Image (spheres, coloured by chain):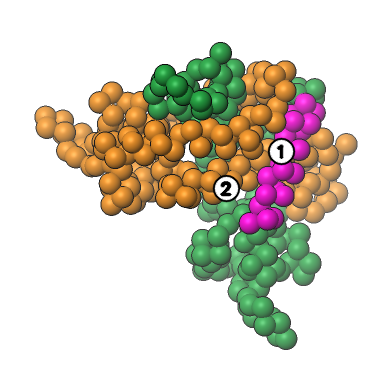
Chain colours: A orange, B green
């Protein structure tokens, strides 16, 4: 049953005493489909945000900040919430600050560093963009599942998300 | 049935005459699970490649080049295959060249630009790393599905991958 698949869980070459648990053909086609959908969907959703001058990561920041109390978050917490490194987030926030979407400020009485605030313009941008974005998500992903598939996918993915989140927390 | 979910397909605020097709609660929990798994899995697999001094994107390049005829590809084609912009790929290949994994060369008689070649060291690196990587993919993803779930996921995702690939081709 073992195959030597041709993607990122791939076997480089067949070896006589190979004890590596290479993916089977069935496993491999699903793994490949998952990788492709994740990557291509990210690309397509990003592409459809371009007319709004937003990258997909920018949109995520707007959403996360808009849900935070007082529409602001400590940079460290924002990095955790968006699963980014602090340095990468810092670059992104600088770009978004230039665009007037967020503002970095020290919090008086809190020495644990900077906060990112959503500006009024950032809030309005998110409100303007969200309807288009949800249509993209439907057109390219959600509406392509039957209700049963939706629930089955959720049942399969939710425990994996929990598992991965717990590993992340430990890091 | 409409809810105003709290992720990237989110509704910014309830509005009286809102005709946006916001995600339902059922749709939203699946969408969120998909996003989380995609992102956290990428993070975790990347983390487990760190002892090998490889980023997840580096590993992908090694795999793609190792499967190409003569273990080389035109940079433009490599960018397409890995869904990256040419400029981002160029930075990545520069880093990998410094690490001795790939080599950029002009192809005599072909004026359509540079090729990226997998070096012998790149090939050996992939062979050394692949067994660990496939174990990571199993531990954090593949082995967490029942055989039925694997097939159901594939059946749901494969047409979406086709759809997204066809859009990408048109761009």
**Quadrant housing the N terminus of chain A:** top right
Q: Position of residue B108 (x, y in %)?
A: 70, 85
Disc 1 marks which residue?
B160
User: Mark 2, residues whose alpha carbon is within 10 Å: few (<14), some, or many (≥20)?
Assistant: some
Q: Secondary structure at mark 1?
A: helix
Residue B131 seen in render: no
Left or right, A102 with reference to B31: left
Residue at mark 2: A43
Position of the C terminus of chain A, as image quadrant, is: top left
Q: Which residues are magenta?
A: B150-171
Q: Position of residue B162 (x, y in %)?
A: 74, 44
Residue A118 spot, x, y in % from top left: 29, 36
The circle drawn on residue B144 is none
Distance CA(mark 2)–CA(mark 1): 13 Å
User: Does B98 sit left or right of A12 as displayed?
Assistant: left
Q: Is residue B162 magenta?
A: yes
Vertical position of residue B100 compared to residue B105: above or below: above
Q: Residue at x 68, y 38 (%)?
A: A34
x 63%, y 24%: residue: A157
Residue B113 placement: quadrant = bottom right
Q: Residues within 10 Å of mark 1 (few under 14, many from 20)?
A: many
Which image quadrant is residue B112 in?
Answer: bottom right
Question: What secondary structure is the stretch in magenta mostly built from?
Answer: helix
Residue at image point 71% right, 82% down: B110
Q: Secondary structure at mark 2?
A: helix
Does residue A96 sit above or below B62 in this rendering? above
Q: Residue furthest left?
A: A109
Give the side of residue B5 with respect to residue B13, left or right.
right
Instruction: Kindly identify which chain the residue marked by label 2 belongs to.
Output: A
Kindly give the residue lying farthest to the front in the view shown: B17
């Amino acid at each position: 049953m073992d195959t030597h698949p041709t993607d990122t869980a791939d076997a480089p070459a067949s070896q006589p005493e190979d004890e590596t648990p290479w993916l089977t053909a069935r496993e491999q086609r699903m793994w490949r489909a998952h990788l492709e959908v994740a990557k291509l969907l990210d690309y397509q959703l990003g592409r459809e945000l371009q007319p709004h001058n937003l990258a997909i990561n920018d949109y995520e920041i707007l959403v996360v900040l808009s849900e935070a109390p007082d529409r602001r978050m400590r940079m460290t917490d924002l990095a955790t919430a968006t699963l980014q490194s602090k340095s990468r987030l810092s670059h992104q926030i600088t770009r978004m600050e230039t665009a007037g979407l967020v503002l970095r400020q020290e919090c008086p009485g809190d020495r644990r560093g900077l906060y990112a605030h959503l500006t009024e313009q950032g809030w309005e941008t998110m409100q303007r963009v969200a309807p288009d974005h949800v249509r993209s998500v439907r057109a390219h992903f959600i509406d392509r599942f039957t209700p049963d598939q939706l629930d089955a996918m959720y049942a399969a993915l939710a425990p994996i998300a929990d598992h991965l989140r717990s590993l992340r927390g430990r890091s």
